Image (cartoon, rainbow, N blue to C red):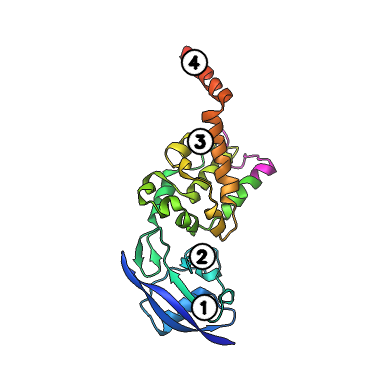
Amino acid sequence: MSYKAKFRVWRGEGGEGRLEDFTVEVNEGEVVLDIIHRLQATQAPDLAVRWNCKAGKCGSCSMEINGKPRLGCMTRMSTFAEDETITVTPMRTFPVIKDLVTDVSFNYTKAREIPSFTPPADVKPGEYRMQQIDVERGQEFRKCIECFMCNNVCHVIRDHEENKPAFAGPRFLMRIAELDMHPYDTVDRRDAAQDEHGLGYCNITKCCTEVCPEHIKITDNALIPMKERVADRRYDPLVWLGNKIFKRSDAKKS
């Protein structure tokens, strides 16, 4: 069974562009990315779209469908009414290269700023021993496919371009939290999370969690616990007193 659907697709380069209207055939079981490919094949051969696996695992086909960040390959046409006009636009937070393709290099820049996993020097690969609870805590975050929709929807950078130099976004604050939870990671990441990567900018609206295609509880399981660990260090009076005492003791020894 097939029908004709109405699509409005963003066309343009750089900061200039417009929405163009199309009427395109839709067949049973298809997803939005199928329709974009049909548009390329039949009406707009120069339409640019980024995609790879078409299985919801590479994160390449991130776009905004009716104003919500989604994966084109995982958004089924059956979720829309047949007479509904479907609007497809590029991710708004990142600069448009052409049509639906955006420049997501911001995310790779932030990734490079985070120190990698740093185990103890005297523990060799194969000698790590972890409790199952520690394995499970970090396992959820490793499901991330780096679609960058969480960073795209985060209003801290979506609505405030000036925040980008100081804010890593949910994706990479989650990475910092994951490493900080690892029992074999020797880097103290709490001060850096707050001072260098902008953890304090996050006001836990959970919009990042809502759009995650892997259903990772970014806010509840990564960002809030990281905020709590930072607050314990900086504002817990007992921790503050302990830091003062130990620093004084270290100074005397030296």
Q: Secondary structure at mark 4?
A: helix
Q: Which residue is nearer to you in this view: 247 or 124?
A: 247
Structural crowding at the residue carrying mark 2, measured as other residues with C-alpha within 10 Å and reported as few (<14), some (14–19) or many (≥20): many
The residue beneath circle 1 is 84
Q: Is residue 172 magenta?
A: no
Q: Which residue occupies 55% across, 70% down?
A: 75
Instruction: Kindly identify the amino acid type of the residue bearing the numbered disc 2.
Output: Arg
Residue under pointer 3: 190
Q: Quadrant of the N terminus?
A: bottom right
User: Badges 1 and 2: C-beta atoms under 8 Å apart?
Assistant: no
Q: Disc 4 to disc 3, how far (Cα)?
A: 21 Å
Circle 2 sits on which residue?
Answer: 70
Label 1 vs 2, first from the N-terminus: 2
Residue, x 39% and y 53% (percent of image)?
106
Q: Amino acid at mark 4?
A: Arg
Indicate whether 182 appears above or below 52: above
Q: Nearer the viewer, mark 3 or mark 2?
A: 2
In primary-sequence order, the first of circles 2 and 4 is: 2
Q: Which residue is mark 4?
A: 248
Q: Are marks 1 and 3 in contact (CB under 8 Å)?
A: no
User: Residue 8: image x %, image y %?
Assistant: 43, 76
Mark 3 or mark 2, earlier in chain: 2
Residues packed near mark 3 inside 10 Å, few (<14), some (14 to 19) or many (20 plus): many
Q: Is residue 72 left or right of residue 28?
A: left
